Image (tube, coloured by chain):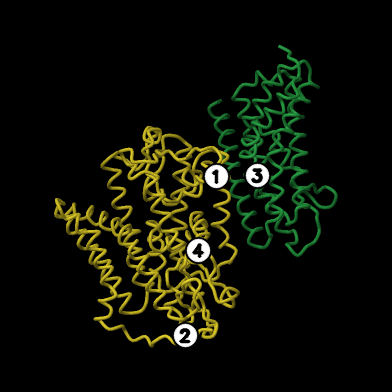
Amino acid sequence: MAAPFAFGEALVLGLASGPACVASCGPVLVPSLLAERSGLRVNSRYLSAFLATRLLGYLLFAAVAWEVGALVALPSSTRSLIFAVVHVLLAVVLLRYAWSVGRVCDHVCTSTELVTIGGAGKHRIPGAAVLGFHTGVSLCPPFVAAGVRAAELANVLAAVLFFAVFFVGTSVWFVPFAGLGWVRRNEAVTTVARMAMALIALYYLYAGLATLIRKSTYGY
Amino acid sequence: MATKVLPAREPRSVGRSLLLTLPIALWSALMFAPIFRGASRPDRIAEAATGIFMVVLFFMMMRTWSTYRWRRWFFVAMGLLFPVGFIHTVMVMRGTMGIPIEEMIAGRTPFCFLPIPLLILPAALTKTLVFPGSILPNGGMSGGGMAAMAALWLGITIVVGKGWCSYACFFGGIEEGMASIPAKAKVRKIDPRWRYGPWAVLLAMVLLSLALFEPAYCMWLCPFKAVSEYVAARSTVGMIQNGIFIVLFAGLVIALPLLTKKRTQCAFFCPFGAFQSLFNKTSVFDVKIDKTRCTPCVLCQKSCPTMALTDESIAKGETLMSCMKCGACVDACPKDAAVWHIRGTEVAVKPERARLMFLYAAWAMAVMFGGRIIAGGLATILHLFV
C-alpha cells in the first residue's frame, strides 16, 4: 500500500538505527581508518569516500529491490545468500586493503592521498570507497527495517529518497570517527590496524563461506 | 642519579630470609588453615602441601635475591593444575567439557577474566553483558559470578598492573612450562612486529563483540578452551570452533614456546594481555634499567619471555608497557642494572625494597588466588589415591 513520504520518519529511523549501523560497520571502518595516515583532513576524506559509496550501495540496492518488488517479499534465505556473497567480497577487499597499506609510506609522508587498492596506474581506487560500498549493500538489520518501510512508498524515486534521508540520519553517528585522525600513526598503529583487518576479514570469509556451503549442501 | 650499589649476590642469611617470609607464612596459614575444619584427608593434604609450597618458594626468593625461577614454579604448577581441577569439576557436574546451550541460556557459564575487555563497550552503550553468565552466583558452574571475578581482577590489577599475567593468569603457566623445557631456543629470530599481535586481536575482538553481540574471543579464538570448556560441538559451526581452539592451543601454547623459549601466546596473541598493558601505566611498580650501570649486553632482552625490552627501550632505561613483571630480566642482568622500581622514586635506589613491596602484594594475591587453584588441582589428584 502506498503511503505519503515522511521526511521526518526516515530521518528519525536513521538516527535511531545509527548506533546499530556503527556497530555493524565498526569492524570494517575502525581498522581501515587507523591504517590511513594521521590527520583530520585525511581521515575526513576517508570518511567522506566511505559514506558516499555506502550511500551509493544503499540507493542502488533500494532502486533495484523496489523495481523487482523484493524489498518486502525478500525471503530470509535469499537475504542470507546476499549477505554471504557480500561478506566474502568484503573479506577479499579487506585483505587486499591490508596488503596495500603495507606499500604506502608511513607517518613521515605528508601526502593526503588515501590508501588505494586495485591494479596499477589509473585503475586504482581508494579502499575507503570499495569498503563503503560493500557495507552499503550488506543488508544489516537497520537497512532491512528501512527497506520494509520504503517498499510501501508510491514509486521508486520516493523509495530512493527515503533511503537517502535514512542514510543521513545514520551518518550523523559516523562523524565522530573522523577524530581518529588525531591518533598518532606509527609502525605500531599501522601494523595493529593491518593485523586487525586481516583477522576481521577471516571472520567475514568464514561467515560468508559457511552460509554459501550450507545453502549449496542443504538448500537453506 | 642512582648512587646506591647493590650488595653482592651472597645468599641472604637464613634468619633474615625467614623474617621476611613471616608475613607470607601468616597469610598462607590464614588462607589454608580454615579449610582443615571438616575437610577430607586428601583436601587437608593438598591444602597443607600448597601452603608449604608457597611459603618455601617465597623463602627461596628472599634467600637467593632472585624472583623469576621461583615464581615460575608456582606459575607452572597453577597452569598445570587448573585444568585438572576444572575439567574434573565439569565432568562431575555435566559429564562433558562441552557447555550445553541450556546452561548458557540459564546463565550458568563460568566466567574467566579473558572476556573482560570485550564486555565494556556493549555494556557501556547498551547496558547489556554479552556473556552467557550471571553477575551473581547462579548455581552449576557459574562459580562466584561475573561480579566476583571482575572485582578480583580490578583489585589485583590496580596494584600489580600487568603483573596479573605473571601471578594470576591460570593459563599462562602452561606455556611458561613449555618454554622452560628446551635448553636453547631453536627459533631465535622473531620479527618484533609480532609483538603488536595482541593489540590487533584486542581491536578485532572488541569490534566484532560489539557488532555480533557475543564475546567473539571466547566463541572463536581462545586457545585455552582446549583445556577448560567450550561450546558443545552439536553442529558444524561447533566443530569448526573447537578445531580452531585446538589448533591455536597446539601452536601458540605448546609448539611455539618449545621452539622459541618465549611465552608466544602471551606475547603475540592474548588480547587480555594487551588490555592489561594499559594498567601498567597505573601500577606503582615497574622495572627500570639503570643507565649508569647498563653496558648494554642485552641479556635482559634475550631473557624476557614476552620481548618487552628493545634496544630503544633499554636506551631509555625502561621496559615496554607489555612488561609482565616476571623478574626474568632483573635476575639475568649481570650488572644489576635492571631493577625493580616504585614510581616516583629514583631508579636503583633501594631496588630490593621495591622488589619486596611488589612481591608482598603479588605473592599475597598469588597465595589467595593461585594457591586455591593449586590446592584444588592437587586435591583432585589425591582423591584418586587417598
| Mark pair 2, 3: CA separation | 49 Å
Find numbered disc 4 in the image and state the secondary structure of the residue it sits on. loop
From the image, tell me which residue sits under label 1: B121
Instruction: Chain letter for mark 3, please.
Output: A
Colour given to chain A in the rendered image: green
Which mark is drawn over residue B280? 4
Q: Earlier in the sequence, mark 1 or mark 2?
A: 1
Residue type at mark 2?
Lys
Instruction: Chain letter for mark 2, please.
Output: B
Decide which of A218, B381 is in the foreground and name it.
B381
Residue type at mark 4?
Asn
Numbered disc in front, either 1 or 2: 1
Across and down, in percent, residue B142 comes to 34, 42
Which mark is drawn over residue B177? none
Find numbered disc 2 in the image and state the secondary structure of the residue it sits on. loop
Find numbered disc 1 in the image and state the secondary structure of the residue it sits on. helix
Q: Earlier in the sequence, mark 4 or mark 1?
A: 1
| Mark pair 4, 2: CA separation | 25 Å
Depicted A61 relative to depicted B331: above or below? above
Across and down, in percent, residue A200 comes to 60, 46
Which mark is drawn over residue B335? 2
| Mark pair 1, 2: CA separation | 45 Å
Q: Is residue B242 left or right of residue A96?
A: left
The image quadrant of residue A28 is top right
